[in-house]
Amino acid sequence: MDQVIIRPILSEKSSLLGSTNKHVFQVSKTSNKLMIKRAVENRFDVEVKKVAIINVKGKIKNMSVKSNGKVLRTTGRRANWKKAIVTLSKGKIDILHGDFQE
């Protein structure tokens, strides 16, 4: 259960959702809605009303690499990841003072 929730996502959009009792988390790619619901309820002692899942595709990034005095342009890709928006019916989550490891 501890490996389901990776970290909270702190952004302008997620802080706006926080005012409507919704919280955003990065979750493992193999997790489903039921696993996320149980993990949030166990970890934060709240009651979850709804879970929405979004699969986020990794961006393609360009980078320069120096090799033998020449600059080579290559492309790389960030990893795909999964985001969950959790709606709470009872309770509150204090994201800023949580025990998340970076």
Image (cartoon, rainbow, N blue to C red):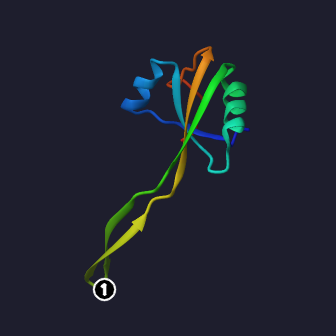
Report the residue that reaches farthest toward the bottom.
68
Residue found 48% across the figure and 36% down from its top: 9
Residue found 45% across the figure and 18% down from its top: 19
Q: Nearer the viewer, residue 54 or 13?
A: 54
Q: Nearer the viewer, residue 18 or 93?
A: 18
Q: Find residue 77 and report its horizontal and vertical position in percent.
A: 43, 64
Q: Amino acid at mark 1?
A: Asn
Q: Could you tell me how many numbered marks the image carries?
A: 1
Q: Find residue 36 and report its horizontal and vertical position in percent.
A: 67, 36
Asked which quadrant contains residue 52, the reply is: top right
- Other-residue count near label 1 (Cα within 10 Å), few / some / many at <14 / 14–19 / ≥20: few
Q: Find residue 38 and report its horizontal and vertical position in percent.
A: 72, 31
The residue that mark 1 highlights is 68
Q: Quadrant of the N terminus?
A: top right
Q: Nearer the viewer, residue 50 or 18?
A: 50
Report the residue that reaches farthest toward the top.
90
* Above/below status of 8 relative to 59: above
Residue found 44% across the figure and 33% down from its top: 10
Q: Find residue 55 and report its horizontal and vertical position in percent.
A: 53, 48
Q: Name the side, left or right, on which 39 lies relative to 83.
A: right
Residue found 34% across the figure and 74% down from its top: 74
Q: Secondary structure at mark 1?
A: loop
Q: Name the side, left or right, on which 74 lies relative to 96.
A: left
* Above/below status of 14 relative to 45: below
